[in-house]
Amino acid sequence: MPNVATWMREKDEKWFRPFFAKRPDVRVWNARSNEVPLEKMDGLLLTGGSDIAPEFLRQEIPDPSVLDKDVDLARDRWEFETIKGVLPRSLPILAICKGLQVLNVALGGTLKLDIPGHKLPEQKDHDVQPLRSDRNATHRFEKVNSSHHQAIDRVADGFEIEAWCAADDIIEQIRLRDHPFALAVQYHPERGGIYDGLFADFFDRINKMNRMGSEK
């Protein structure tokens, strides 16, 4: 059975459950509550959460008051270490909201630590934010449900930008060049009904990775 590693908050599980239910052939390991045997994993899912703890950021923090107070050091430590472990193995990666920020910082990028206009109530669960997408992007959405107060500033080396907010050019989707599948999005596909294809692509890649491992 293919295995995917993640660290997921309890309150987010309800959003992902319908997508996992469609793929009973894939086992999801949540590092928040269980030990995850990374050597047996076929993919990595990085989900939303609180701000990255300051000690993991690669930049100065002029105003620490803009950062969340409820950072999760254990989670950040696990995610940064796990990224280091899965990248050389070319495992499929899907990174969502905070996950996009973690992946970018892990590879050398920086963040805008507080941005206006991207955490309005209607943006959380409704596809209202218009995007501009690169024509080469596999997954393109006219509007998304993007709710966040931080965003990418300097993009880490190796990433291609695939989508921007049409209003202010905040980066909303990136892809790691020269990696079989490493897609990171600032919006929340787990909370919408238009993103089935994105999750299907991710889980299909995990199944493929598992079959390749079984054939060795």
Image (cartoon, rainbow, N blue to C red):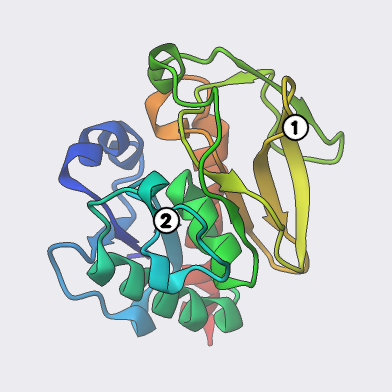
The reply, left or right, for residue 189 in relation to residue 49 is right
As drawn, which residue projects farthest toward the bottom?
Answer: 216
**Image quadrant where residue 154 sits:** bottom right
**Image quadrant where residue 78 sits:** bottom left
The number of callouts visible is: 2
- Above or below, 74 against 118 in this view is below
Amino acid type at image mark 2: Leu
Q: Secondary structure at mark 1?
A: loop
- Whole-angstrom CA distance, mark 2 to mark 1, is 23 Å
Around disc 1, counting alpha carbons within 10 Å, would you say few (fewer than 14), some (14 to 19), or many (20 or more)? few
> Does any portion of residue 208 appear in the rendered image?
no
Q: Quadrant of the N terminus?
A: bottom left
Residue 35 in picture, x, y percent from top left: 18, 75
Amino acid type at image mark 1: Asp
Residue 191 in picture, x, y percent from top left: 38, 26
Which residue is located at x 22 percent, y 41 percent? 13
Which residue is located at x 50 percent, y 30 percent? 196
Q: What mark, if any, has residue 46 been given in the picture?
A: 2
Q: Which residue is mark 1?
A: 169
Around disc 2, counting alpha carbons within 10 Å, would you say few (fewer than 14), some (14 to 19), or many (20 or more)? many
As drawn, which residue projects farthest toward the right?
Answer: 135
The reply, left or right, for residue 174 in relation to residue 67 is right
